Each structure stands twice: as structure tokens, then as C-alpha cells.
Amino acid sequence: MAPLMLVEEPAPHVRRLTLNRPDRLNAMTSELCEELHEELRRTAIDRSCRAVVLTGAGRGFCAGLDLQGYGAAPENDGSDESRDRLANQQHMSTLVLELRALPQPVIAAVNGPAAGLGLALTLACDIRYASPEAVFRAAFVNIGVSNCDMGTSWLLPRLIGASRAHELMLTGRLLDAEEALRIGLVADVVDEERLPERAVRGAEQIASLAPWGVRLTKRGMWTALEIPSEQAAVEYEDRQQIMATFGRAVPEAIEAFLEKRPAEFAD
């Protein structure tokens, strides 16, 4: 049986996680969900990993919840239906929180449909690149439930603005790659065969920088989305910046610049 998650290191300090249910467009089951949880937990404590690429095998990124059957979250025992349903929901939704909390920046290489939970996973990543075959959809409303799910109602308006987010959430329509690029949801659209290389190249750019500075930047960018005022954001940035000046990264970066050589940063 093929593994549900493929884990590779396509470049130094770069880890690629591939959802591997191509026959189902990588639709999420409890088994695949648990595999992704485990890999994210492993990655979070691996200081040698500086950037992550998340993608899907075959012609899809993730078509969302597998409507043929999700299965059961690890703690489910069948004794309480409402509790088990909530456990399943949280089993999936906490993936979004884990991606955001991951110290390393995550690039989504969206190679095909990203719907429902698949859309939420892309939104929780820090950068999104797409192939022309990529399509995005807030899909839950199309099966009779709320589209406010898996963090999408919080993330989507902050990435593309409230007006556009309302339209996509309330209509449940498809969003193609070119429109996603035009409205700023994705950072680049490249041919399908070039997408893996484009994602790895972006990850390599991140991995070449000082890990502590990158981690503080990721944390600061997400925190800024929740800070209520400009003054609070500036005060938070001030504290972050002073923290970043300790250690060897700053003098190494300056020395490397003056000596016209690549900087070498410790993990």
C-alpha cells in the first residue's frame, strides 16, 4: 500500500510534504489527516528544516473532505455521536492552526483543485503558488452546511479583503488560477511542470536567510493580523527586532555582505 504522505528534501533545509491520495484528488480522510499532523509535529521541532512546501500528488491539491467517508479521529470510540463528530471536525480544523503555528514558513504548491479543507490548508500557508490547472472553492455551502469552516471565514477576508471574500463564500463558486493571481490570493502562476521547481526555489530563498529572523518574521506577520492598532503593532515589532539582534546572525550577515559572499547561518 502506498504511503499517504510523501516526505522529501528537494533542497538543503527544505522539506516537501505531499498528500498522496491521487485517485481521490487527495481528499482528506482521518488517516491522511493524522499523517499530516504527525509530519507537522516532526517538522516543528526539526531546526535543520527552514522552509516547507505543501502539495498534492497527481492532478489535485486537496479536494476537501472525502465524501465517501472520513473515518474516525484517534480519540473516537463510538459512545457519543456528537462528541465524535466534534472530534472529527477538530481533527481537521487544527491542521490550519498547526500550519500557522509552524515555525518554518510554508509554501503551498497548488497543482489542482483546492476545495473546502483543501482551500483552508492553502490559506493557512504563508505563500501560495499555483499552476493554471489550480481551482479554489469554498465548497461547504454547496453541500448544505456553512462555508464558515476550518478557519476560512477568518483567513480569506484578511488575504483578499472582505468584499471579495463575502462573494466567494456566499456563492460557493470556483476561482481559477488567473483570478486568484489577480486578486492576490496566490503570488505566482506557473506551468504545471514548473510548479514544483518554482515552489522549491521560493523555499530555497527563505532557507538561505537567517532562520531566527525568518521565524520571527512569520510569527510577526500572522500576529499583526490580530493586533488591533498600529501602535500595538509597532510596539510588538520593536520587541521582536531587539530580540533578533542577539546571536551571530546579524554580524554574520553584515560580514558576508561586506565580503561579497553568501552568509552561513547556524540552525
Image: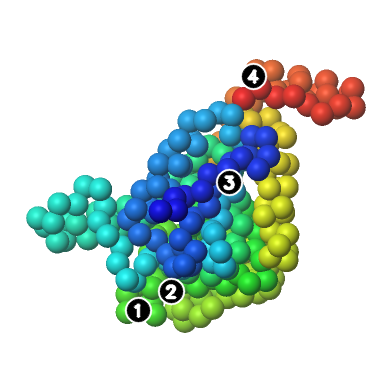
Q: Which residue is mark 2?
A: 139
Cβ atoms under marks 2 and 1 closer than 8 Å? yes
Whole-angstrom CA distance, mark 1 to mark 3, is 32 Å
Scheme of image coloration: rainbow
Residue 18: image x %, image y %? 53, 52
Whole-angstrom CA distance, mark 3 to mark 2, is 26 Å
Quick one: label 3 or label 2, which is nearer the N terminus? 3
Q: In the drawing, what numbered circle is on residue 143?
A: 1
Identified at 65% across, 18% down, the residue is: 247
Q: In the drawing, what numbered circle is on residue 195?
A: none
Question: Residue 198 appears in which quarter of the rendering?
Answer: bottom right
Amino acid type, residue under disc 1 in the picture: Ile
Amino acid type, residue under disc 4 in the picture: Phe
- Mark 1 residue element: helix
Quick one: label 4 or label 1, which is nearer the N terminus? 1
Q: In the drawing, what numbered circle is on residue 246?
A: 4
- Mark 2 residue element: loop
Amino acid type, residue under disc 3 in the picture: Arg
- Does residue 119 appear anywhere in the picture? no
Q: Nearer the viewer, residue 211 or 51?
A: 51
Identified at 35% across, 78% down, the residue is: 143
Whole-angstrom CA distance, mark 4 to mark 1, is 52 Å
Q: Which residue is mark 3?
A: 16
- Mark 4 residue element: loop
